[in-house]
Amino acid sequence: MERGKDLAEGSPSGGDPAAAAAAPSRYESQKRRDWNTFGQFLKNQRPPVALPQCNSNHVLDFLRYLDQFGKTKVHLQGCIFYGQPEPPAPCTCPLRQAWGSLDALIGRLRAAYEENGGSPETNPFASGAIRIYLREVKECQAKARGIPYKKKKKKGPGKPDGESHSSSMPFS
C-alpha cells in the first residue's frame, strides 16, 4: 500500500528499480527547467508571446537576456587584457554566458520544442539565425580570451585512432 502511494506521489522507493527508472535524468530535468524558463520569458514580454507565435528573434532576445546571469569574463576590444587567456588582474569587462552553455541550452530547447508539439519545420531553435548567433558568440569569446578555436579534422579511413592533427582534446 505504501509503495503505491510513493509511486503516485513520484517519490522513489528504496531499491525499487522501477521507481529509479521513472526518475528523470539530469538532462531531462534540465530540459524541462529550460523549457519552463523560456515559456516564462515569453509570458513576460510586452505584449506576451504565445508559443506558436515565437520565432528566432524571440530566441535571440532570450539568449541576450541570459547574458546578465553569465559567469564567463569576455574582454572588450579596448581592454588591456583582450586576447589574454589568464589576465593578471581584474577588469570591468562584462560577464557573459559561455558559448558552450548557450550551445547546450539551444540543443535542449530544440528537443523540448518538438516534444511539446512543435514541428521541426517551424522550430525557432533550429533556425539559421540561431546557428549564426552561436558561431559569432564562439568566435568573439575565443578572440577575447585568446583561445584559438580550430575546426577538428575528421579522421579519414585508415588513420589509427591515436593519430590526430588537432591539438585540442577529443570529445567522448
Image: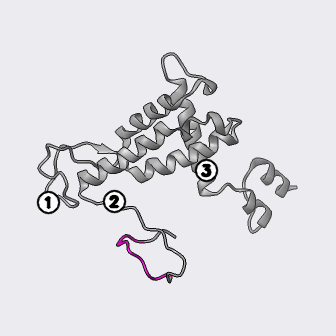
The amino acid marked with disc number 1 is Pro
- Please, which residue is most extreme toward the right here? 1
The range drawn in magenta is 161-169
Query: In this view of the protein, which residue sits in the foreground, 153 or 14?
Result: 153
Q: Which residue is mark 3?
A: 29
Which class describes the residues within 10 Å of circle 1: few (<14), some (14-19), or many (20+)? few
- Which residue corresponds to the image point at 68% horizontal and 36% vertical from the top-left? 119
Q: Which residue is mark 2?
A: 149
Quadrant containing the N terminus in the rendered view: bottom right
| 62 lies left or right of 38 | left
- Which residue corresponds to the image point at 36% horizontal and 44% vertical from the top-left? 136
The amino acid marked with disc number 3 is Ser
Q: Is residue 96 above or below residue 117?
A: below
Which class describes the residues within 10 Å of circle 2: few (<14), some (14-19), or many (20+)? few
Distance from the alpha carbon under mark 3 to that under mark 2: 30 Å
Q: Which residue is mark 1?
A: 88
Task: Determine if residue 136 is in view.
Answer: yes
The amino acid marked with disc number 2 is Tyr
Residue 78 rendering spot, x and y as whole percentages:
14, 43
Residue 36 rendering spot, x and y as whole percentages:
58, 37
Residue 20 rendering spot, x and y as whole percentages:
73, 62
Distance from the alpha carbon under mark 3 to that under mark 1: 38 Å
Q: Nearer the viewer, mark 3 or mark 2?
A: 2
Query: In this view of the protein, which residue sits in the foreground, 61 or 91?
Result: 61
Residue 99 rendering spot, x and y as whole percentages:
39, 50
Which class describes the residues within 10 Å of circle 3: few (<14), some (14-19), or many (20+)? few
Q: Nearer the viewer, mark 1 or mark 2?
A: 2
- Which residue corresponds to the image point at 74% horizontal and 50% vertical from the top-left? 10
| 7 lies left or right of 139 | right
